């Protein structure tokens, strides 16, 4: 893969995690609840099903604008999903090295940097890189779904305004 992919992952990851640190923490907690394999499965279903849904809308003249809107949101979702996958991967890698998880701004920045580099290295592998890229995007889409379904539980330990709280 090109180095531009790494730069995009890092820049968008830093913007996303620093702008919405609470969402990153909720994503990690939601994936712990449903499991990464389940989230990836739902993300793969979304990755395959969305273009089919857009095609069904595009069959009629009236549904064509809806199909274009679905595909535009789909493109943005794929980009955001790859950044999300890098952030989750980085958070997991840092958590495996340090036993104490500290969800502060330094941790988030480190997770983005470590995750982006690790994902970039994985997708740069010649034969299985494209397959890993698809799995990463599906995982990111699954994390979105997990956050939508499970990310706002009152017992998740996340209090509005305390995204950087050290547990």
Image (spheres, grey):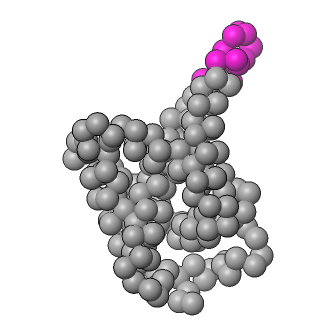
* Position of 120 relative to 93 (above/below): above
Q: Classify residue 166 as left or right of residue 96.
A: right
* Position of 134 relative to 84 (above/below): above
Residue at x 53% of width, y 70% of height: 21
The segment highlighted magenta reads 55-68
Residue at x 47% of width, y 44% of height: 135
Residue 52, image x, y percentages: 64, 23
Dominant SS type (magenta): helix
Residue at x 23% of width, y 42% of height: 2
Q: Quadrant of the C terminus?
A: bottom right
Residue 122, image x, y percentages: 31, 51
The magenta stretch spans residue 146: no
Residue at x 57% of width, y 78% of height: 163
Q: How many numbered marks does the figure carry?
A: 0
* Position of 154 relative to 134 (above/below): below
- Where residue 155 sits, quadrant-wise, is bottom right
- Where residue 160 sits, quadrant-wise, is bottom right
159 or 2: nearer the viewer:
2
């Amino acid at each position: 893969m090109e180095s531009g992919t790494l730069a995009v992952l890092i820049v968008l990851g830093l913007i996303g995690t620093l702008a919405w640190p609470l969402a990153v923490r909720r994503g990690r907690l939601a994936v712990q609840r449903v499991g990464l394999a389940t989230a990836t499965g739902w993300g793969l279903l979304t990755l395959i099903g969305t273009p089919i849904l857009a095609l069904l809308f595009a069959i009629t003249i009236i549904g064509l604008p809806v199909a274009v809107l679905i595909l535009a949101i789909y493109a943005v979702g794929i980009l955001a999903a790859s950044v999300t996958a890098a952030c989750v991967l980085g958070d997991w890698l840092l958590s495996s090295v340090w036993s104490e998880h500290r969800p502060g701004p330094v941790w988030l920045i480190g997770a983005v940097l470590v995750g982006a580099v690790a994902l970039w290295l994985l997708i740069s592998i010649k034969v299985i890189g494209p397959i890993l890229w698809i799995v990463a995007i599906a995982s990111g889409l699954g994390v979105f779904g997990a956050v939508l379904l499970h990310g706002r539980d009152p017992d998740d330990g996340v209090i509005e305004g305390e995204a950087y709280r050290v547990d």
